[in-house]
């Protein structure tokens, strides 16, 4: 009998709102299956975040949730927000909780892979030949830029209201994301495209200068620069020209939703948000999808692929990341599709999750 007891990994599950709850149910099923059928020892706990937390505690990010997140080895997040909380002041809206979590956990590096499996090339918004075997990675700076800069707010000025947000990056913030981007590019195709708006925004002129300086430390990587408006166009014109794309917080938010459609659906794009030690939070790129919430229609694959990223980056178990990715690919090859990927014969959120777990079971045997 084996006496080996593997280290306990403490995972915090934050379902949040809308379809966040449904897709997290599938992630939890997957994790419980792994716990019961492998040598891994995963300790799962859940906490409130977003609108659900606001309704129960009066704040979208209770101190208890933040403290559990800081103690966890990794955090999984579903999605936050929805029409119910849209009239609240921005300072207490569910989305603010997400920004604060990212900031408090210092998760400055957000990796958003857009990978097109051959089975889904026909589901893409582009012609299949433009996207088949596409594998690009968008790296988004996640704790700076216009979502965090000060001053911010709505002020009285000259007898009218003026709304202000500030696009701010320090040299050190740019340098640390640049190192992540260059190091990541070294592990892939060694092509790094930095996206900015340096023709009009001084902050991104600094961004470009710092990237050029850091590039000298990575001579094997080819660095190019592109303006964000062109990058948005190029992503849908010829996406395979990109390998790794790195950009600031808001540009990365927008470009990753565009990249999602190359894969067929925003329900396919996972993400990893990492701190300097690769401790992280893992969440799909999409939001709480109020239009389909509670209908068993959400695609859970972005969430399940985020679990795979967690095994790869925070738990140092690349074998399980690969197994989950394979189980997802098998499920697609078998023809299973949620409603976002197929007009007919689609399966619900729970059935899709069950199929992935069934395939994982086959791979483990
Ligand atoms: N990370 C997060 O928690 C995010 C939260 N939000 C919040 O979510 C709420 C809704 O935002 P929207 O702008 O509508 O963006 P969204 O990403 O929630 O939905 C956009 C569209 O994509 C569809 N969709 C999204 N995820 C899907 C999935 N897994 N399967 C199938 N279809 C899916 C939705 O049905 C909708 O038609 C807002 O309150 C917003 O602030 C938005 C983006 C990210
Ligand atoms: C609260 C938003 C910034 C969330 C979002 O749209 C994202 O992270 O992609
Ligand atoms: Mg977004």
Image (cartoon, rainbow, N blue to C red):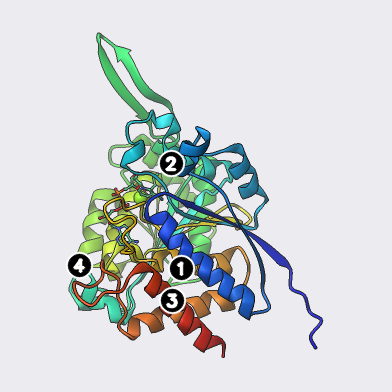
Q: Which residue is mark 1?
A: 304
Q: CA distance from mark 4 to mark 2?
A: 32 Å
| Ligand 1 is within 8 Å of the C-beta of the residue at disc 3 | no
Query: Vertical placement of 158 versus 129: above or below?
Result: above
Using the image, tell me which numbered label, if any, was put on residue 60. none
Q: In the image, which is nearer the foreground, mark 2 or mark 1? A: 2
> Does label 2 or label 1 sit earlier along the sequence?
2
Label 3 crowd bin: few (<14), some (14–19), many (20+), radius 10 Å: some
Q: Which residue is mark 4?
A: 125
Q: In the image, which is nearer the foreground, mark 4 or mark 1? A: 1
Using the rendered image of the protein, determine whether residue 255 is visible from the camera's viewpoint: yes
The quarter of the rendered structure image containing the C terminus is bottom right
Q: CA distance from mark 4 to mark 3?
A: 27 Å
Say what secondary structure mark 1 lies in.
helix
Give the image location of residue 169, x and y in percent. 46, 38
Say what secondary structure mark 2 lies in.
helix
**Which residue is more in the foreground, 283 or 63?**
63
Query: Vertical placement of 327 versus 255: above or below?
Result: below
Say what secondary structure mark 4 lies in.
loop
> Does label 4 or label 3 sit earlier along the sequence?
4
Give the image location of residue 9, x and y in percent. 67, 64
Q: CA distance from mark 2 to mark 3?
A: 28 Å
Could you say which quadrant of the image residue 161 lies in? Answer: top left
Q: CA distance from mark 1 to mark 3?
A: 11 Å
Q: Residue at x 57, y 76 (%)?
A: 320
**Which residue is more in the foreground, 33 or 103?**
33
Q: CA distance from mark 4 to mark 1?
A: 22 Å
Using the rendered image of the protein, determine whether residue 219 is visible from the camera's viewpoint: no
């Amino acid at each position: 009998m084996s006496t080996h007891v593997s280290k306990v990994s403490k995972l915090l599950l934050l379902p949040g709102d809308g379809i966040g709850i449904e897709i997290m149910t599938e992630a939890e099923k997957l994790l419980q299956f792994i716990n019961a059928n492998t040598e891994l020892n995963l300790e799962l706990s859940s906490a409130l975040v977003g609108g659900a937390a606001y309704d129960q505690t009066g704040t979208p990010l209770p101190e208890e949730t933040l403290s559990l997140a800081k103690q966890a080895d990794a955090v999984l997040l579903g999605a936050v927000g929805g029409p119910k909380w849209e009239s609240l002041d921005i300072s207490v809206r569910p989305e603010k909780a997400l920004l604060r979590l990212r900031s408090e956990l210092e998760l400055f590096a957000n990796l958003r892979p857009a990978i097109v499996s051959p089975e889904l090339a026909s589901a893409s918004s582009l012609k299949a030949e433009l996207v088949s075997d596409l594998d690009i990675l968008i790296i988004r700076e996640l704790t700076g830029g216009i979502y965090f800069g000060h001053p911010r707010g709505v002020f009285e000025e000259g007898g009218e209201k003026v709304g202000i947000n500030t696009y701010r990056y320090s040299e050190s913030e740019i340098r640390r994301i640049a190192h992540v981007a260059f190091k990541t590019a070294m592990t892939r195709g060694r092509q790094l495209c930095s996206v900015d708006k340096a023709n009009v925004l001084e902050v991104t002129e600094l961004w470009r200068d710092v990237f050029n300086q850091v590039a000298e430390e990575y001579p094997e990587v080819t660095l190019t620069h592109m303006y964000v408006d062109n990058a948005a166009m190029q992503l849908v014109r010829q996406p395979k020209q990109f390998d790794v794309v790195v950009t600031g917080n808001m540009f990365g938010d927008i470009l990753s939703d565009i990249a999602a459609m190359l894969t067929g659906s925003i329900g396919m794009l996972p993400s990893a948000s990492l701190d300097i030690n690769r401790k992280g939070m893992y969440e799909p790129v999409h939001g709480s999808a109020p239009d389909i919430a509670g209908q068993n229609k959400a695609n859970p694959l972005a969430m399940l692929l985020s679990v795979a990223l967690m095994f790869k980056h925070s738990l140092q178990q690349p074998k399980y990341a690969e197994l989950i990715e394979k189980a997802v690919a098998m499920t697609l090859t078998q023809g299973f599709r949620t409603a976002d990927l197929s007009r007919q014969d689609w399966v619900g959120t729970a059935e899709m999750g069950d199929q992935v777990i069934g395939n994982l079971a086959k791979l483990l045997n």
